[in-house]
Image (spheres, rainbow, N blue to C red):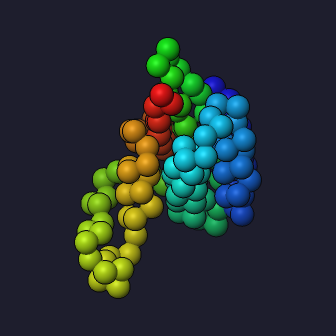
Amino acid sequence: MIKKRFNPIKDKSSEIIEFLMSSPDIPDDDILQFKLRLSIEEAVDNVVRYAYDGGIGWLEAGTRIEGSDPILTIELRDAGKKFNPLERKDPDISLNAEDRQIGGLGIFLCKKMMDSINYRYENGNNVLTMTKKLN
């Protein structure tokens, strides 16, 4: 896994996103890169904004490719507040933006753009794993 720890994460969303998007694991495909960037931006922003009070904490971000039918895995790990974004109910996108509850749209978009998203709480860390088939 190609990974890096950012500490502290305050004001480092764009640096973390660019680190992940510049990984050699990210394929050279504009449509796929759009989907990956959107998902990465949403997931990273959630951690940077909400995991730690004041953004003083760390985030470990990494990518890897596995299997003969390659699957890209993007993993975010932090020791912030325990939070499973997948427990949140998907927003009702049939409603006008003004009529929808605030929040939840970012992770909903991640679910639509990626093949799978998993969350686990492990050894005091939030671990969010997103995968995308590359074939």
Above-or-below relation of 93 to 33: below
Residue 94 in percent (x, y) is at 25, 72
Residue beneath the point at 48% across and 28% down: 135
Residue 30 in percent (x, y) is at 61, 46
Q: Quadrant of residue 63?
A: top right
Q: Is residue 56 left or right of residue 92?
A: right
Residue 23 visible in the shown view = yes
Residue 125 in percent (x, y) is at 51, 41
Quadrant for the N terminus, please: top right
Residue beneath the point at 65% across and 37% down: 28
Q: Is residue 107 left or right of residue 38?
A: left
Q: Is residue 3 left or right of residue 87?
A: right
Residue beneath the point at 39% across and 39% down: 115
Residue 83 visible in the shown view = no
Depth check, front residue: 124 or 114: 114
Above-or-below relation of 48 to 128: below
Q: Residue furthest top?
A: 68
Above-or-below relation of 16 to 106: above
Residue beneath the point at 67% across and 58% down: 13
Q: Residue furthest front?
A: 30
Residue 3 in percent (x, y) is at 68, 33
Total number of numbered labels? 0
